[in-house]
Amino acid sequence: MARKKTSKKQSSAPKIQGYIAGAGEIVEENIVSTLKGNFMPYAMSIILSRAIPEIDGFKPSHRKLLYTMYKMGLLGSVRTKSANIVGQTMRLNPHGDAAIYDTMVRLSRGYEALLHPYVDSKGNFGKFYSRDMAWAASRYTEAKLDPICNELFRDIDKDTVDFIDNYDNTMKEPSLLPASFPSVLVNANTGIAVGMASSICSFNLAEVCRTTIELLRNPDHDIMSTLVAPDFTGGAQIIYDKKAMESIYETGRGSIRLRGRYTYDKYANCIDVLSIPQTTTSEAIIEKVIELVKAGKIKDIADIRDETGIDGLKITIDLKRNVNPEKLMSKLYKMTPLEDTFSCNFNVLIAGTPRVLGVRELLNEWSAFRIECVRRRTYFDLHKKMDKLHLLRGLEKILLDIDKAIKIIRNTEEEEKVIPNLMEGFEIDEIQAEYVAEIKLRHLNREYILKRTEDISQLEKEIANLESILASKTKIKNIIIRELSEIAEKYGQPRRSMIIYADEIDDEEVVQEVPDYPVNLFFSKEGYFKKITPLSLRMSGEHKLKEGDEITQHIETTNNTDLIFFSDMAKAYKAKAADFSDTKTSVLGDYIPSKLEFENGESAVYMIATKDYSGYVFFVFESGKVAKVPLESYATKTNRKKLTGAYSDKERLSAICYVPDDESDIVIISTSGRALVIRSGDLMAKATRTTQGVAVMKQKKGHRVISARLLTEGILSDPERYRAKTLPSMGQFPRSREGEQMSFSDT
């Protein structure tokens, strides 16, 4: 319930000027009713009137703009200022000049976002592949409709589509455009509504027309034989996966892998990228390459720059000496937006209902729409010709006695009696009489009337032909087929996107070249980490540490090592030694919780360094239970940085210990003062990381395990004395505390 509280004084206030009745009173309203009454109509408006295209391939904003330009007479050779077009469009689209001009830019030839642009532009309209190349203001640019718009508006004045009132009921606009080709598939279209979205990739016009023709002839036609793959305006390469493409064609959903095209200039030792995926920009690619170079992940590039100019997109990458351009581009495809995916979601409004359709269904729906357009056009032409024939039949009767017609008109004293007298004199109806009465005096001769009546036989043939078309769905389909063939011949273009097959691409994992050299890794109790080379360690003094901190782990390894940091919240964070900079003992080092983005209040408690993930991790709990987990359980195929459920959180953790093999000994210490030595091979490894382990060291009431570590020389004078024959065991008290270092804490 939504409630608004006010004082009683407001509700009982006198009715004076400026006071609104009921203002300030407590109103209770069901939130479900509010959503249904307010939000749902808004959501439906977004879906139906803004974001989702209809079967003609256009959203309302596109349709309103193009129809305004059509009514302005811009389907010819004359351009006008874009500001003029924007202003006129506001009679149909009240969403503001900026939104209208943005729509116009995206439909323009200059912007290059469409395979077949609808607006022939002049001036700076920006580029779809550039994020920073802004288009000029509407007062500086000019535009007209592109010739292909003849096919969008063909016979629109012949009642081919319905017309509706604009937002203030002052003029009419078409609810759809009678597009004579499947524009819904020819040009890309994306939109986000409330709770749904639409993303339709573009296809080659000639291929779409041929496929539609074959479907009209044979509903079972194999679409992929004539419509091989989408075609993108940027000309990027399509990595063809037959199963993925079949899924898109069948369901209308799926992803298409795209990658840029390039050439290598061996004389200049540079790579020129000439096309990029539709989903990215040149600036995004350049920024990502620069980031990789600065991070040291790519070392083969000397320089990169944007050389886009009048000839189109061009990103130039200067290479260092002896660099293999193919291997470098393979890395860039993996690590930058030079290879990307286009997500397809063929969501289209069909009779006001959003539907996700496959290509076959979409073309069938367009065919049904176009059949209805041609039927309505034919019906319109039929009635026009029948009306004309009707008039000529009346004129034919006048031909029998022209003098009589003249005499009737001359002898009629009142003008309003002329039509009835002609109707009576020649047995014609009112419409025919009106037509005869309106003939000019100079045309009241036998020659004129004979010429007009000669059209009767031709009209009768044309009417018979139109009636036969209306009666035959096959003839209507043949008309559509003929029109599609003409459009494909007139406006068809070669494919821009090259098709390469997925099995021909080398998808080897990009291995980062990490310099490998000896390093010493130090980890402190407070979670600080240092990586120091042996030379630097020999020349350094004592470690700089925070007050109360101490070094708990020192590992000698190499730079090409994986690191696993366990936290006190049963999580493991993975990194590589190469991710950390070489440092000295005189600095605090990297604070692991910050470096690896731990959660608030989470601390690092143990570090493991490994190259092959061999060995085991022992988790020792305060209750005396021990869990043995293979280290390979923390190896991942993907580059995951964080693993949840690294160990069981059912009990409090006392210590973590890495054991390289089953022949190692571990010493466990309890608050009771007892010690227990176990051989790692005595415990079975568990398959799951979150295992609670098995009871190893019994604890009396009030006591707990406080530490555990690998048994090394000097910790216990007689290790065998503390080794139990059976587990669990209480452990043993030391004979003498002198010489036995049992005060260690390894947490």
Image (spheres, rainbow, N blue to C red):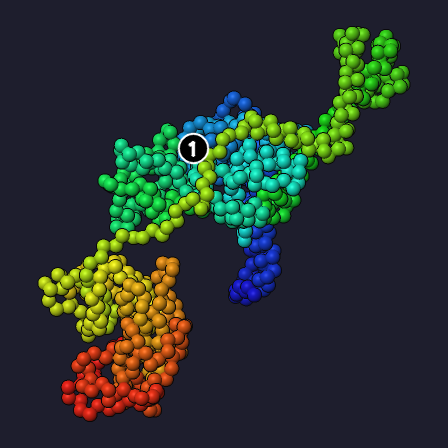
In the image, 30: left or right of 410? Answer: left
Residue shown at 22% from the left, 85% from the top: 719
**Left or right: where 357 falls relative to 529:** right
The residue at the point 15 percent across, 88 percent down is 738
Q: Position of residue 699 (x, y in %)?
A: 33, 89
Pinpoint residue 677: horizontal percent, then vertical percent.
Answer: 27, 84
Can you tell which quarter of the image residue 260 is in?
Answer: top left
Residue 176 seen in render: no
Secondary structure, mark 1, is loop
Q: Nearer the viewer, residue 585 or 499?
A: 499
Q: Position of residue 262 (x, y in %)?
A: 36, 37
User: Closer to the camera, 252 or 432?
Assistant: 252
Check the image and report above or below for 704 versus 644: below
Residue denoted by label 1:
125
Count of picture labels: 1
Rendered-image quadrant of the N terminus: bottom right
